[in-house]
Image (cartoon, rainbow, N blue to C red):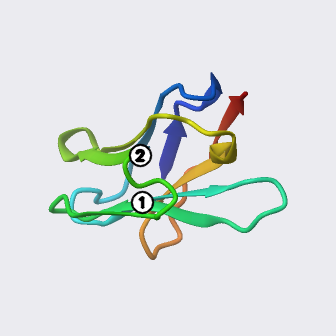
Amino acid sequence: QLQASGGGLVQAGGSLRLSCTASKIIFSTKTMAWYRQAPGKQRESVATITSTGTTNYADSVKGRFTISRDNAKNTGYLQINSLKPEDAAVYYCNIYGTRYWGQGTLVTVSS
C-alpha cells in the first residue's frame, strides 16, 4: 500500500512537502510517480523518479517542484515551491504503471 500525506492550505507563493510511504511493496526498485487532479479536470502526471534517481517533470511544474526518494525509508517526496492557485488539487502517489496508488492528499492554495 501507499500512504500519502503532507497536503494542506498554503498561501500562493508558499511551499509544501508531500510524502508517500510504501508498505508491503518492493519500493526501491520501482519508478515512483506523483499525479494530481483538480476539480473538474483529468488526473495529470506531475513528476516521476526512477529507482536510480532520474527525474522527469511536467512542464507546468518544472523549476518549482522537486521529486525525491529515500529508499531506506520506503518513502518518496514531492517538494512544492512557489505555489500557484492552479496547483490546487488532490495529489496522488503511484508506483508507476501499477495499481498501487496512495489515497490522495489535498493541496489548497489561497491567493
Q: Residue at x 62, y 29 (%)?
A: 12
User: 12 and 91: which one is in front?
Assistant: 12
Q: Which residue bears the numbered disc 1? A: 47
Res. 103 visible in picture: no
Q: Nearer the viewer, mark 2 or mark 1?
A: 2
User: What is the x, y in percent for residue 73?
Assistant: 25, 38
User: What is the x, y in percent for residue 7?
Assistant: 59, 32
Query: Which quadrant of the view contains residue 105?
Result: top right
Q: CA distance from mark 2 to mark 1?
A: 8 Å
Q: Are marks 2 and 1 in contact (CB under 8 Å)?
A: yes
Task: Please rate how many residues cluster around mark 2, counting C-alpha atoms within 10 Å: few if below 14, some from 14 to 19, many from 20.
Answer: many
Res. 92 visible in picture: yes
Q: Amino acid at mark 1?
A: Ala
Say left or right for 70 vs 76. Answer: left
User: What is the x, y in percent for residue 98?
Assistant: 47, 73
Which residue is at the far right? 40
Q: Which residue bears the numbered disc 2? A: 65
User: What is the x, y in percent for residue 101?
Assistant: 54, 59
Which label's residue is closer to the chain start, 2 or 1?
1
